[in-house]
Image: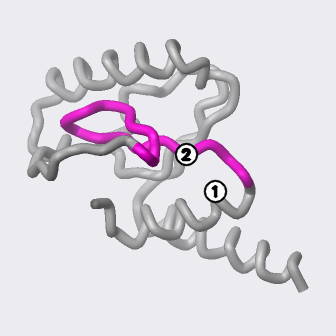
């Protein structure tokens, strides 16, 4: 369902590194890669700041239940990570363009390491 270049590149990198991957969904909150969901048209980009804050609270609760506060990185737009600042080990990267450059760099580094 998720086909954007940032998602695809991030997924490639994380799977090669053996990281656990979760998806931030505007409708469902935190999803595992193998979760089955129905297609939807929701996005945080169309929500108010208060609605995004409530969404982040719900996702934070899901993360706590899964024990995900030890070490994590969000690869996503600002609206998806803006209310997670200050949490332990949060590493938010500014701007989608910067994130695409960074993840492309990491993938190139992986490819060289395999040679």
Q: Is residue 67 left or right of residue 109?
A: left
Q: As displayed, is residue 51 above or below residue 4?
A: above
What colour-coding does the image apply?
Answer: one colour
Residue drawn at 72 percent across, 52 percent down: 18
According to the picture, the residue beneath numbered tag 1 turns out to be 14
Q: Foreground: 55 or 1?
A: 1
Q: Quadrant of the C terminus?
A: bottom right
Q: As displayed, is residue 2 above or below residue 21?
A: below
- Place residue 113 in its image quadrant: bottom right
Disc 1 vs disc 2: Cβ atoms closer than 8 Å? yes
Q: Is residue 65 left or right of residue 90?
A: left
Residue drawn at 9 percent across, 44 percent down: 46
**Could you say whether the residue bearing mark 1 is in a helix, strand or loop?**
helix
- Place residue 59 in its image quadrant: top left
Residue drawn at 50 percent across, 13 percent down: 65
Which is more N-terminal, label 2 or label 1? Answer: 1
Residue drawn at 12 percent across, 45 percent down: 42
Tell me where residue 5 appears, x and y as whole percent.
Answer: 40, 72
Tell me where residue 114 appears, x and y as whole percent.
Answer: 86, 79
Whether residue 8 appears in magenta in the rendering, the answer is no
According to the picture, the residue beneath numbered tag 2 turns out to be 21
């Amino acid at each position: 369902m998720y086909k954007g270049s940032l998602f695809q590149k991030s997924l490639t990198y994380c799977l090669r590194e053996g990281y656990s991957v979760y998806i931030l969904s505007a409708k469902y909150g935190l999803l595992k890669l193998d979760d089955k969901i129905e297609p939807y048209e929701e996005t945080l980009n169309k929500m108010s700041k208060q609605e995004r804050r409530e969404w982040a609270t719900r996702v934070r609760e899901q993360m706590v239940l899964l024990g995900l506060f030890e070490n994590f990185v969000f690869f996503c737009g600002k609206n998806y990570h803006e209310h997670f600042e200050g949490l332990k080990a949060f590493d938010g990267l500014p701007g989608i363009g910067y994130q695409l450059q960074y993840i492309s760099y990491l993938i190139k580094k992986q490819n060289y390491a395999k040679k």
